[in-house]
Image (cartoon, rainbow, N blue to C red):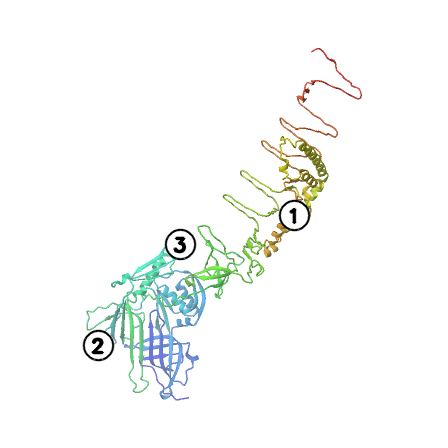
Amino acid sequence: MSEHVRYTQAGRLMAIDTVLGPDALLLERLEVEEGLNRLFTIQARVRAQRDEVRPDEIVGTAADLSLTLADGSQRVWNGLVTELHEGPIVTRGARQYALTLRPRLWLMSQRSDCRIFLTHSTLEVLETLCAEHRIRDYNLAGVTRPPQKRDYVVQWNETDLAYLIRRLEEEGLFYWFRHERGKHTLVVGDHPSAYDGGNETRVRLAFGSSDAEHIHDWRRQLSFTPGRRAGKDYEFLTPNLDLVADTPSIDRVPENTAYELYEYPARALTREAGERATRLRIQATETGFDRIEGRSSVRTLAAGSRFTPYEVAHPGHVYPAQVVTQILHRAEDPTYESGAGTPHYENAFTTLPADRPATPHRTVPRPRIDGLQIARIAGPPGEEIHTDAFGRVKLTHLWDRRARGDGTDTGWVRVTQSWGGTSWGQQIIPRVGMEALVAYQEGDPDRPIVVGIAPNPNNPVPYALPAHKTKLVVRSNTYKGRGYNEISMEDVAGAENLFTHAQKDMTTKVLNDATARVDANQVGSVGANHSFEVGNNQNQAIGGSRSLTVGAVGGAASAALGAAMAGLSGQTAELLGQAMGVAMEAMAADAGGSDAPVDAGALSGGGALAGLAAGFGGLVGGGGIGGLLGGGIDATRAGINDASVRSLRTAGGAGMAAAGTALAGQVGGMMGGLGGVMNTMVTRFQNNTTGIAATEQVGVSKVVNVGQTMLENIGKAHTHTVGEQLVINVGKEMQINVGEVFQVVVGKSNLTMDKDGNVTITGTKMLLGFSDSVTAFGKVIDLNPKR
């Protein structure tokens, strides 16, 4: 070990005190740069009175550096050693070192993060970050108007220091550091009252030589500054409010009123915030209007301290109070080397009128997020849709390591829609767990907006791809369930299909007309009940045939009904044949006349009427039209009625469409190729009620076949007209009951019976012929009396 001459710092101009112990290091040269709205930096050249100083012994520890004042007291700077530079060996084996000291706040520059501060004011952010960095020495008493809480502010790829300073600058808060032995304190203010010292602190200004400490260089600088600051922004919650604000400067020079600094967005979402923002911006501008640059030997000048200059030679000169905004101290003590010189101190400083706040400019760049980011829709546990009155959602950002994922630690984020108006437009709310594409308004991390949703393995596409690449799909999902609603379009050539699926109800409201045209077939199936109401008139035209079955659904059920009625159907077919035979004879007899009420040829389409009638009779006699399709149709019906949820989810309506086409084809052949046929089958009862009048026209023949009984009840009159022949066949008994008069008239012959028992037969001739006897009973029998 080298032998060192032991020196002491006692009684010298300056000294340093570190964890290495008293006088382990000797302070030879000192340079301190401090100011408002900046971190201080201390550069110290020291001489070590030991062989070696290791970085792990001193870097990251606190040190005090003192400067002896004229009255013998000491002014102290305190800082954290952040750098150690090893220098050369000087006299007597001692090695020089250079130390760099900074405030503990500088440690915030050694950590960067991406995080969200929700409903925090800037001062609360400061307190939070200081607590995380174990910084306890800060003073906020100089803040006269504490900033408001901000709903959602993001630290984006910034160091904690850059983020904090940016927040302070945005709120117009200035800061500096007070030093005392053992600590330094961060001081924050927004008003001149926060400065240290008072106007009574006087500092001598002398432009000549003087033995006392004094300011020897004083240069005032007045600069042209813009006469106004203005800004504008937009808040969607108040879309009709014009958020424009401007504030004029208190400084006036020729023409500066014509110059304005305008910015958009002003990051102020209320008029009050806009006015405050422009006021802070113009205050920052005004700090550059009137400045003093000077040099002095006054050792007590410090950043944030107020003083008033005075001149002994010119006591009438009055100087306004100033506040030191920036100062560079330089001190040197070469007395550790004999004959090297004398100790020396000087400083260079900049000041601002002490009645003005040192409102900072926004020097820290705001971070930008360009392009899109990925996030997840967030919500409370068990919730699928988490939104507010404006359709906003909560997000879990992938970069947010502190995110709880339930949305409680993030703000509401707007969601773009393809269309929107006054209570109309599109409304699609992203659901919890979906992968969101997030853009940022003006690139501002504080203003995210969801612009889309992207599928991933956890949230796959509605239909498997690329197998269903030709589908356009809009599918929802039952809230807290497994059902869904869907509108999808299949664009495969030749298989195009528009598919609609309603998980429960489907409601349509048309305020005027609804028109639909199906060029081919239409198949419908209703599982339970169907009600149809027409307020005025209804017209229905069927070009082919129609079959209506009441009481049975499906081919098998209709076939069973037809089989039950098979006997009666056979009789009906036979009666139809007889009726058509008579009709054909009548039409043949009248072929040359013009009295026929019906053009049978027109009704039969020019075809053979007898052949058509025979074909229809065959359909009826074969067990009833309702049984023609039989059970074979039911398999096709099942493709429509029993389509599974799985098949609809994976294939859409393709299966139902194919089944519908097949069923339409089967129905097309139902009438055996006959057109113009209507068949109605009712399994049990049928009732027809007409309020006033009912008519029926049958062009050629009509057959009514009743299996058991038939009863007609006519309230007043019944007229039955037969053009040529009426035949009544009764198998056993026929009974006619007439209340008052019964009359049969055939030409000149007349049979009349009344309720009193009078029977009158009149005519021209009467012939009675019986194969057996004739018996007549009467109280008086008068044959051929005189009239």
Q: Is residue 663 left or right of residue 41?
A: right
Q: Circle 3 sits on which residue?
A: 239
Instruction: Please determine whether, in this image, residue 298 is positioned above or below residue 93.
Output: above
User: What number is the disc on residue 70?
Assistant: none
* Crowd class of label 1 (few under 14; some 14 to 19; many from 20; radius 10 Å): some
Between residue 518 and residue 485, name the one nearer to us.
518
Residue 753 horizontal/vertical position (percent): 68, 20
Q: Circle 2 sits on which residue?
A: 208
Residue most toward the top?
Answer: 786
Instruction: Please determine whether, in this image, residue 304 is positioned above or below residue 581.
Output: below
Please name the residue shown 71% across and 29% down the image.
Answer: 728
Residue most toward the front?
Answer: 592
Between residue 737 and residue 270, name the one nearer to us.
737
Residue 403 horizontal/vertical position (percent): 49, 64
Distance between the Cα atoms at labels 3 and 2? 65 Å
Q: Is residue 760 visible?
A: no
Tell me the kind of residue under disc 2: Gly
Residue 82 horizontal/vertical position (percent): 40, 76
Q: Is residue 182 left or right of residue 519?
A: left
Q: Circle 1 sits on which residue?
A: 666
Q: Quadrant of residue 708?
A: top right
Distance between the Cα atoms at labels 1 and 3? 61 Å
Tell me the kind of residue under disc 1: Gln
**In this rendering, which labeled residue sits more in front, label 2 or label 1?**
1
Quarter of the figure with the C terminus: top right
* Crowd class of label 3 (few under 14; some 14 to 19; many from 20; radius 10 Å): few
